Image (cartoon, helix red, strand yellow):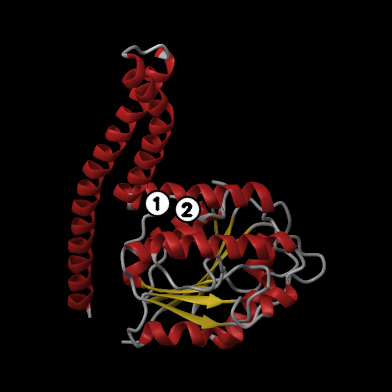
Amino acid sequence: MSEKIAVLLPAYNEEVTIQKVIKDFQRVLPEADIYVYDNNSKDRTNELARAAGAIVRFEPRQGKGNVVRSMFREIEADYYIMVDADDTYPADEVEKLLEPLRSGMADMTIGDRLSNGTYAEENKRGFHGFGNNLVKFLVNKLYKGQYEDIMTGYRGFNRLFVKNFPVLSPGFEIETELSIHSLDKRFKLVEVPITYQDRPEGSESKLNTFSDGFKVLRMIFNLFKDYKPLLFFSICSAIFFILGLFAGVPVISEFTQTGFIAKMPSAILATGLMILAALSFVAGFILDTIVRQNRMQYELKIYEYYENLLDKK
């Protein structure tokens, strides 16, 4: 049975580049189905994509995460290549992403723009480089990863990953969510260095450096709370405990010397902070138990899905 490959192109106002991207992938992967999901484009993206021979679908909910959710639900394939439609990633290097998937070495492949320096050379938006490095540092530290490019828009997936990935993000946070989910659920990841080139003249970035950057950071910490609640709430507990000590030590010192508590507000504050510290730790412990059970259920679901895949083959 021949393998089925789907190339996924989320697109919003990409009339300058969409046809070139489609034709490039048609050239290197003539057997692949190329899907363009138009996310409320105001220009001729839809029309030009159809003319180039792509399968065009419409996603009314604004945001890249919403597009990816629909793509993963609706498209059936053995292997998936997801790439931005802005002509910043080379179609000629797609086999680098496919080979680890075919060999079973990876469930998700990551097109790494950063380690070879091409992103630093081509990117003309300084804060984007800083943001990429900050996100890489946080994700690798919090989730014990060792990856260079967390936010790349060039990725490959096998069917197992795509059909078992719950998309939560509505927008550009989706790349970060993909990386964190795969680390937490221990999917096999392989990074491959790829060449990056900046957008061609006339093509404008849809990424807002500060507002989208804030959303990415919020996603990192929200998933940290959800995936590692014991550690998250232990940190909160430690903070409340230390603040409680600062508020309570003078009160205790005064009481041991005089037998009276004159600083009643400080005593109440210290007591409240210590209660919050205890509650935070207990909440983290309970939630950690729930998360462990959910992770076990997810693993069993993966086993069941994998067996069904083998049966179909």
The image shows residue 26 at horizontal and vertical percentages of: 58, 82
- 247 sits left or right of 213 in the view: left
* Residue count near mark 1 (Cα–Cα under 10 Å), binned few <14, some 14–19, many ≥20: some
Which residue is under mark 2?
220
Q: Is residue 289 above or below residue 101?
A: above
Q: Quadrant of the C terminus?
A: bottom left
Q: Nearer the viewer, residue 7 or 96?
A: 96
Nearer the observer, 153 or 283: 283
Q: In the rendering, which numbered label is found on residue 200?
A: none
- In front of the other: 268 or 93: 268
Q: Amino acid at mark 1?
A: Phe
The answer to whether residue 208 shows anywhere in this view is no
- In percent of width and height, residue 157 lies at 41, 73
Against 207, residue 203 (above or below) is below
Circles 2 and 1: CB atoms closer than 8 Å: yes
Secondary structure beneath label 2:
helix
Q: Mark 1 highlights which residue?
A: 224
- Bin the neighbour count of mark 2 within 10 Å (Cα to Cα): few under 14, some 14-19, many 20 and up: many
Q: Which quarter shows the N terminus?
A: bottom left
Residue 220 coordinates in the image, percent (x, y): 47, 53
Q: Secondary structure at mark 1?
A: helix
